[in-house]
Image (cartoon, grey):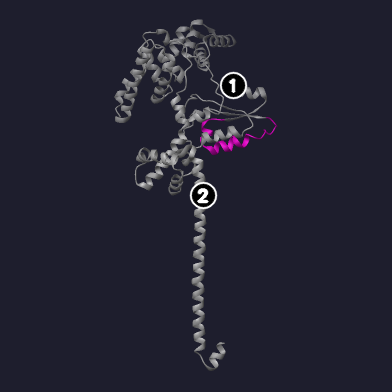
Amino acid sequence: MVECLAREFGYELIEMNASDFRRSRDIDRVAIKSSDKLSLDGRKKIILMDEVDGIYEKIDAGAIDAILRLIEETKFPIIMTANDPWANQLRSLRENVLMIGLKKLGKREILEILRRICVAENIICKEDALEYIYNLSSGDLRSAINDLQAVAEGFGKVDLDLTKTILRRRDRELDPFETLRNIFGSKYAWQAKNAITNTSLDRDMLLEWLNENLPNQIQDPEDLWRAYENLAKATIYTSRIIRTGDWDLLSYAIDLMGPGIAFAIKNNEKDKWRWVKYSFPERIRELSKTKETREILNSIASIIGAREHISRLRAKTDVIPFLRIIFQHNTDLAAKMALSYGLTDHMIKILAGEKSSEILRKIKEYQTFIQKISHEKEREHEKREEKIEKEKKTKKEVKKEEKISGQTGLDKWWRR
């Protein structure tokens, strides 16, 4: 699609895949340098960054920041593709881009394209075989065309028996929205389990998505209570797996968050298939917003822990709450403590809130006063040193005079 756009508008296409923007310097080298200059023949450019969800926060440090910088600086359009746009590492990107979902094609569209290909290639194809290929594709046109080619090239015709013999149903990862719809709409336990085992979400993130969207899907209070009861038990099992390492408990967690939720809907069966616009977990969104604050609090706890010889956890639970009270009610003492601990402006703002400007002003006053005292002490020290030097010099001269006055005759005259 991006190649088509480039040809349509006469743009030069600059393409980068996941291996090209693992590091920030790769983006600086390829994309940013070409983001504000026309091509050699005077054409504008379009930048394609393919599979950005292949970036990993810990391994590819700085890559997301470099992409955000590119978005701010470039004069040309940027298009990024992702199989899983809801990946954790992409949260800051999601806030700075327009997200366009490429939805699966419907049965009518895919069958029409397959028929057109068969006519163009002179292939004899049966309608039931094409429908079987469509069912295997799960709405993915590329998969459907590949399957059609696999059958047609070998035998020159496409019928149901050949198609069933050659093709096998493929498992595909489900995005978060498909996962939830498949869980809620499951008629059998195995369908709900398949939705969980084939999802692109990890277990913890799936629990968050379910927790956020249960009240959107289930309207009956008793059904909703049953669903949340099963979800709570699934959460207990997953936490015990982490704490004990007993992975035998995973099957119980899957049963509770899959079939347990699907079969909790008893009073109002229509809720299973009611269309709902699912929401991204608000808790995860809030955590991403407060990430900087939490990191600053951790830094404060580290400073206090090192100074007071206590753990960072104890500093966070036993010291920082009282520190907040001091900073919000006693600005004079807060300013002195901030200077003593060496706290930064951001740390003071987190602890003091609205009082931070007053504390920062007092800190400047103290710093000016300290500099003045320090300067005065330096001057006093210099004067004392000058006085000592002068006294030493005077003593030397006196001794010299005494020595000269002790001499007589020609020696005394010569010295003078």
> Residue placed at 40% from the left, 21% from the top?
211
Q: Nearer the viewer, mark 2 or mark 1?
A: 2
The answer to whether any part of residue 122 appears in the image is no
Which residue range is magenta in the image?
Answer: 16-43
Image height of 302 relative to 397, above or below: above
Which quadrant of the rendered structure holds the C terminus? bottom right
Real-space Cα separation, disc 2 to disc 1, in angstroms: 61 Å
Nearer to the camera, 407 or 395: 395
> Residue placed at 60% from the left, 36% from the top?
32
Label 2 packing within 10 angstroms: few (<14), some (14-19), many (20+): few
The amino acid marked with disc number 1 is Met
* Residue hosting label 1: 1
Across and down, in percent, residue 109 comes to 55, 10
Residue 106's disc number: none
Which quadrant of the rendered structure holds the N terminus? top right
Residue 365's disc number: 2
Residue furthest to the bottom in view is: 409
The amino acid marked with disc number 2 is Glu
The answer to whether any part of residue 331 appears in the image is yes
Label 1 packing within 10 angstroms: few (<14), some (14-19), many (20+): few
